[in-house]
Amino acid sequence: MGDNNIRHADDVAEMLRHNSTITNFVLSENNFSDKDAALLAQVIEAHPSLTEVDLSSNNFGSTGGLHLRRMISESTNLVELNLSWNKIRGEGAVAVAEAIRDNVGMKIIHLEWNGFDRQSGAKLAEAVAQNRTLTQLNLYSNRIDSQSFLAICQALKDNDNLQTLKIGKNCITEEAAAAALDLLKTYPELKIETIDLSDLIFSAALAEKVKEVKEIHEDFNFIYGYTDSYGKRKLKSYDVVDEALTFFKQYMAENNIDLVTFFQEMDDDGSMAVSYDEFREGLKVMKIPLTPLQVDQLIAALDMDGDGDIDFGELVIGAEEHSH
């Protein structure tokens, strides 16, 4: 029922009351208001089977967030909730964050493109510290500042379940990103697999911090830089490739490795060509601090003939063409 501009939720609520078997319900882009949020929250909370609900791209504001609080905190069936592209802010954002803290079943929640700020960010940090079921939290493009980001990273020390935190396109400085990485190095165990700061552009110096964390927590990914994350025109990919090759060359220089030696380490059969997976594994084994985005675009740039393999010649030519 998404993208129907329904505007009033009365009939939808009535339908949900009489359909007890539906598990996945999409109500995005319907111009629902705060008043509708109150009605929908009541029936969703009481529904015996709903596990996934999409309420994105509506007009829920601060009051809507207050109405949704009880539904989020009390629901035991909901596994995934999408509240992205609304206008939830202020006390409504605080209420949603507190509800996430108290929920005991939800695994994935989308809050991107709302108005979560320092105050609600502090409550989200509490939620990360106390919630024991959430595995994915998307806060992309809100008003999260450096202080809130660091508070959330501090909370990761006590969290054993969160795997992915998407928090790009917020007001997070490079200094805060570096401080967060220093903090993560001190944790003896790190359960989170990915912190995604997409569309935040930092200097090459941060890569050394990422490398230091990966030496301790080798499966950890810290993403930042250019993406096509919200359907806009992608920024030129050569920027990402240049940055990736800069890190690559720095690693080889620091470790006194030439291109031939690097390639031979990956080329088990001596064919002078490696698959994408072999190239990725080689970068991982050598602990070259590249993000998944950088690796993907580097592979795309190096495979000049598009045959699915990276030849030694392609690596040499690519390194030369993208040299500064």
Image (tube, rainbow, N blue to C red):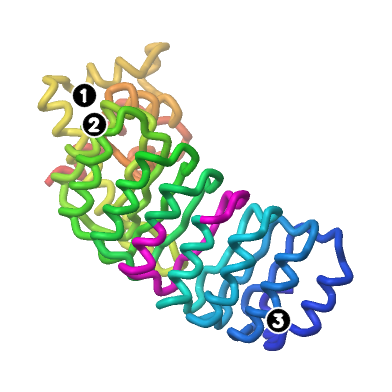
Q: Secondary structure at mark 3?
A: loop
Q: Position of residue 280 (x, y in %)?
A: 39, 30
- Highlighted magenta segment, given as a residue range: 102-124
Q: Is residue 315 positioned above or below 95 on the image?
A: above
Looking at the rendered structure, the kind of residue marked 1 is Leu
- Asked if disc 1 and disc 2 are in contact, CB closer than 8 Å, the reply is yes
Q: Secondary structure at mark 2?
A: helix
Instruction: Say whether residue 117 is magenta.
Output: yes
Mark number displayed over residue 316: 2
Q: Is residue 304 visible?
A: no
Ranked by sequence position, the earlier of labels 1 and 2 is 1
Distance, label 2 to label 3, CA atoms, is: 53 Å
* Mark 1 lies on residue: 259
Distance, label 1 to label 2, CA atoms, is: 7 Å
Instruction: Say whether residue 186 is magenta.
Output: no
> Camera-side residue: 311 or 18?
18
Q: Nearer the viewer, mark 1 or mark 3?
A: 3
- What residue lies at 55% left-to-right and 79% top-to-bottom? 64
Ranked by sequence position, the earlier of labels 2 and 3 is 3
- What residue lies at 43% left-to-right and 31% top-to-bottom? 276
Q: Position of residue 126 (x, y in %)?
A: 40, 54
Looking at the rendered structure, the kind of residue marked 2 is Val
* Mark 3 lies on residue: 4
Q: Position of residue 181 (x, y in %)?
A: 24, 42
Looking at the rendered structure, the kind of residue marked 3 is Asn
Q: Quadrant of the N terminus?
A: bottom right
- What residue lies at 58% left-to-right and 64% top-to-bottom? 82
Circle 1: is it few (<14), some (14-19), or many (20+) Cα within 10 Å? few
Q: Secondary structure at mark 1?
A: helix
